[in-house]
Amino acid sequence: MTRPVTAGLSMSLSEECLELLACPRCDAALLAQPDGLDCKACQVRFPVLDGLPWLFAEPAYALGEWRARLHLELQSLTQRAARLERELADPALLPDTRDRLRWLHDACRDQRGRLEFLLAPLLDGRDAAARETYLALRTRLPSDQGLNTYAANLHRDWAWGLTENRQSCEIVASQLPADAKRLLVLGAGAGRLACDLHRAQGAELTVALDFNPLLASVGQRLSRGGNLELWEFPLAPRGPRDVAVLNRLQGLDAGPGLQFLLGDVLRAPLAAGRFDAVITPWLIDILDVELRELAPRVNRLLRAGGAWVNFGSLAFAHAQEAMNYSLPECAELIATSGFGDWQAREDRIAYLHSPASRHARDELTVCWRASKTAEAPALPRHSALPEWLVTGREPVPLKQDFALQAANTRIRAYVLGLIDGRRSIRDMAKLLERERLMRADEAAAVIRRFLIQMLDDSRRRDLP
């Protein structure tokens, strides 16, 4: 039986789990303290909020960023409710339309309160790190990932039924070695797959790592047998009341040994060579690094002979086409990172089939297993930011995209300065021609496209 190591803020880690943790800045061991986890080498304390360790390389910055994203989500719900109130003031609404809008309005207001309660530890007013601190560490959170980006996964994992969850668990479990008792799930999301694999495998210890505090908080709570209610806002509602559905997210007890962590999978806060299997579900194609960098980092975490099991899509979308690998290319690349004994299966499964939505799809998934046969070449610690941006001393490179954006910005700024409530598009086009920026006929088309975009943006924001 494992003895828990208890630190404040409701954290309880087994000794076995604590031994697996490592500082994401320097790889030193972490020590449990009354209010968090300490790296003595870096002199940094990693906080624990509501029992969830925050093991980002710069924890204060991560807290500040996620707090800002939570406030943005709360503000978005408030603004949406306000827009719905204005629409409800229209006396010409159909009775059914009024009922639908009122239902959605009330759901938005209620969802705000539920998120505030669930993520209250994020709203305690802690200061964010100075910009220079996280720039020095070259860390940042993906700018395109909001708190609610993967909200559908919460409902898929814990509310919509067992079909998708069972399919995923059966596929991944079929590739896991029978003797794999220490599991690591990178990009665990809302945690249902980690929970199901932990139970199915009879694992002694499963670590579920994700960077989104909403997903990790819900996963931790529900995998301990808890439950909660959150609103789902389906993409294509089946009926009027399906615009917002209050789902009961029903948990199950995963048993001892399942631990959720918050951190960056590219700077995993874990000791090297300690896991029997690393699972990467629906992850490799959404990271902003190519597979060539991820593979050695997975290798580092596995013991000799351990298995990397990848599951999900190969919908790579890198700007550099060479990085958008096919399945045979994945096998070839992984072999250069200390892996062998490759095997893969493909399965068509249901994906995000909400009972309340008309939108659903099936996905042809790939699940491969590769065994660690050698140590991969060591990589430097992952850096999200280039040197010229970090130090501020090197010249900013004149990238083609930068130059194009600069030209567009100058023209747009000039056009905006011409809007005075009196000039027409033709008047502005003549002025652009007079300034020798472009011919009047070309300028008219450019100005029209620009103003259409501005009009569309203002309509989406409900501005006059």
Image (spheres, grey):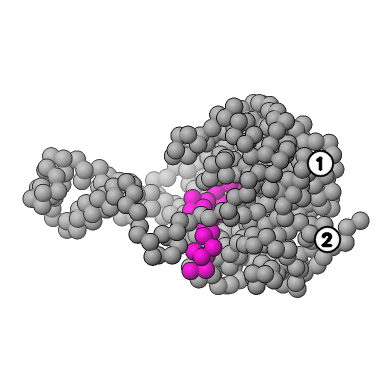
The answer to whether residue 227 is seen in the rendering is no
How many numbered discs?
2
With respect to residue 402, does 66 lie above or below? below
Residue 27 lies in what quarter of the image? bottom right
> What residue lies at 64% left-to-right and 60% top-to-bottom?
24
Q: In x, y percent, where is residue 209?
A: 68, 52
In the rendered structure, which amino acid carries the disc numbered 1? Ala
Q: Can residue 3 be found in the magenta stretch?
A: no
How many residues crowd around disc 1 within 10 Å: few (fewer than 14), some, or many (20 or more)? Answer: some
Q: Quick one: SS at disc 2?
A: helix
> What is the spatial separation of the Cα atoms under label 2 and label 1, in whole angstroms?
19 Å
> What residue lies at 70% left-to-right and 33% top-to-bottom?
340
Q: Quick one: SS at disc 1?
A: loop
Tell me, for residue 15, which label it has, or none: 2
Residue 372 lies in what quarter of the image? top right
- Which span of residues is magenta-colored? 132-152
Q: In x, y percent, where is residue 214?
A: 63, 55
Tell me, for residue 180, which label it has, or none: 1
Relative to 146, 48 lies left or right: right
With respect to residue 424, does 26 lie above or below? below
Q: In x, y percent, where is residue 39?
A: 69, 68
